[in-house]
Image (cartoon, rainbow, N blue to C red):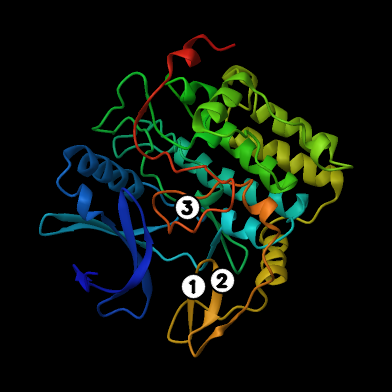
């Protein structure tokens, strides 16, 4: 493990994947922790990987929103590019779902609304000349939405985002993303726009409120085929008494025809706000923070000398035998949810959980081009 990069002392490895490694770090002269993302050593000599990393850095420098992880510095140490980013003191939704039996519709709606607000900012962003970026995240999923212990929500990992500034372009017939969270057009290798991210938000909302995977299958091929065909179990069939209005919102997000979805993340936010008013639900960071306290208890403040994050639980560094969290949900719930991405640790798979990350390129099977 390297010990320094640029003006940052690397404390420990937070996450490791095929594209990049992320370290907890201290910045020289400042009393704060940051997350430093470094291109993986195995990718350092690959021109395509370096281009994708630079594209992500250029995009992140132009984004500034409370529901997006902030970027403090983009630089190179010798020939090694890196990003210094806000350290998010919390867990991703995949970890949260594995630590609880269910989070309830009000909290789920609050989380997705906040994520949609961050994405709406990204979708609307223009470059320095006022030209629209036409940004599409393309990798919205449980593991790329983080929740802090004070109730904030952060969308992370723009590593495969498409923008008008992108130097690297994906070849026709090549898809990027996770099979279980792709839109139909993304799975088919067709052009995508912001409605692809709306589709993925619908999947996240479905999974948070039902506790099961939306588009299931024994392989990426089966999951992508389910996406293209729009085949998923209705939320009401999963949860007795499920809100019909919420089910209608999810159905709109998951329309196979992009023209039948919400036209923007802002339109989805409007629908969710109307739902909350109609149902009389709690909303905002308050309901999210209450959920985090219920699951993890009273957690120490931002990481310092007394606490560190390990596998999604918070442990006191003076007594690592005392995790402050509830017992995880039964294995059957955990294995129905996506495992993660290439930018986070790879836990041991549960029996039957074969949802491998799909950050890399893959050709679209010909069958998809003729699927209904």
Picture mark count: 3
Residue on which the image places disc 1:
309
Which quarter of the rendered picture does the C terminus lie within? top right
Q: Is label 2 in a helix, a strand or a loop?
A: strand
The image position of residue 235, as x and y in percent, is 77, 36
Which quarter of the rendered picture does the N terminus lie within? bottom left
The image position of residue 287, as x and y in percent, is 73, 61
The image position of residue 48, as x and y in percent, is 21, 37
Identify the mark nearer the N-term, 1 or 3.
Answer: 3
Q: Are marks 2 and 3 in contact (CB under 8 Å)?
A: no
Q: 10 Å neighbourhood of mark 3: few (<14), some, or many (≥20)?
A: many
Real-space Cα distance between discs 2 and 1? 6 Å
Please state which of residues 223 and 273 is positioned toward the viewer in this rendering: 223
Instruction: Decide if residue 284 is on the left or right side of residue 41.
Output: right
Please state which of residues 255 and 310 is positioned toward the viewer in this rendering: 310
Identify the mark nearer the N-term, 2 or 3.
Answer: 3
Residue closest to the far bottom: 318
The disc label shown at residue 313, or none: 2
Judge depth for marks 2 and 3 and give the one in front. Answer: 2
Q: Is label 3 in a helix, a strand or a loop?
A: loop
Q: Residue at x 47, y 52 (%)?
A: 68
Q: 10 Å neighbourhood of mark 2: few (<14), some, or many (≥20)?
A: some
Q: Are marks 1 and 3 in contact (CB under 8 Å)?
A: no
Real-space Cα distance between discs 2 and 3? 22 Å
Q: Residue at x 59, y 54 (%)?
A: 93
Q: Are marks 2 and 1 in contact (CB under 8 Å)?
A: yes
Please state which of residues 143 and 132 is positioned toward the viewer in this rendering: 143
Instruction: Decide if residue 183 is on the left or right side of residue 80.
Output: right
Q: 10 Å neighbourhood of mark 1: few (<14), some, or many (≥20)?
A: some
């Amino acid at each position: 493990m390297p010990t320094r990069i640029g003006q940052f002392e690397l404390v420990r490895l937070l996450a490791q994947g095929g594209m990049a490694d992320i370290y907890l770090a201290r910045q020289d002269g400042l009393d704060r922790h940051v997350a430093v993302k470094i291109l993986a050593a195995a990718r350092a000599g690959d021109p395509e990987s370096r281009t994708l990393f630079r594209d992500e850095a250029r995009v992140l420098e132009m984004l500034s929103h409370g529901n997006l992880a902030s970027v403090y510095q983009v630089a190179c140490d010798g020939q090694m590019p890196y990003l210094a980013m806000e350290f998010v003191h919390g867990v991703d939704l995949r970890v949260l779902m594995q630590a609880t039996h269910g989070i309830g519709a009000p909290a789920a709606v609050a989380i997705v609304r906040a994520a949609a607000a961050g994405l709406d900012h990204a979708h609307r962003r223009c470059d320095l000349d006022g030209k629209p970026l036409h940004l599409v995240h393309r990798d919205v999923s449980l593991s790329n939405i983080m929740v802090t212990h004070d109730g904030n929500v952060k969308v992370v990992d723009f590593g495969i985002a498409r923008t008008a500034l992108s130097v690297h372009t994906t070849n026709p017939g090549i898809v990027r993303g996770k099979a279980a969270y792709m839109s139909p057009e993304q799975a088919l290798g067709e052009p995508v726009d912001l409605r692809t991210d709306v589709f993925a938000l619908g999947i996240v909302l479905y999974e948070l409120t039902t506790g099961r995977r939306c588009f299931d299958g024994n392989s990426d091929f089966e999951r992508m085929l389910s996406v293209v065909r729009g085949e998923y179990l209705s939320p009401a069939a999963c949860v007795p008494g499920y809100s019909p209005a919420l089910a209608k919102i999810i159905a709109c997000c998951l329309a196979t025809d992009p023209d039948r979805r919400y036209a923007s993340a802002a339109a989805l936010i409007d629908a969710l706000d109307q739902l909350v008013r109609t149902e009389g639900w709690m909303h905002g960071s308050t309901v999210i923070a209450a959920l985090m306290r219920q699951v993890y208890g009273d957690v120490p403040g931002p990481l310092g000398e007394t606490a560190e994050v390990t596998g999604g639980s918070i442990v006191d560094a003076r007594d690592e035998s005392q995790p402050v969290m509830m017992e995880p949900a039964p294995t059957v719930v955990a294995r129905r949810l996506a495992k993660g991405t290439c930018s986070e640790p790879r836990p041991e798979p549960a029996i039957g959980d074969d949802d491998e990350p799909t950050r890399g390129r893959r050709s679209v099977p010909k069958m998809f081009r003729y699927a209904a």
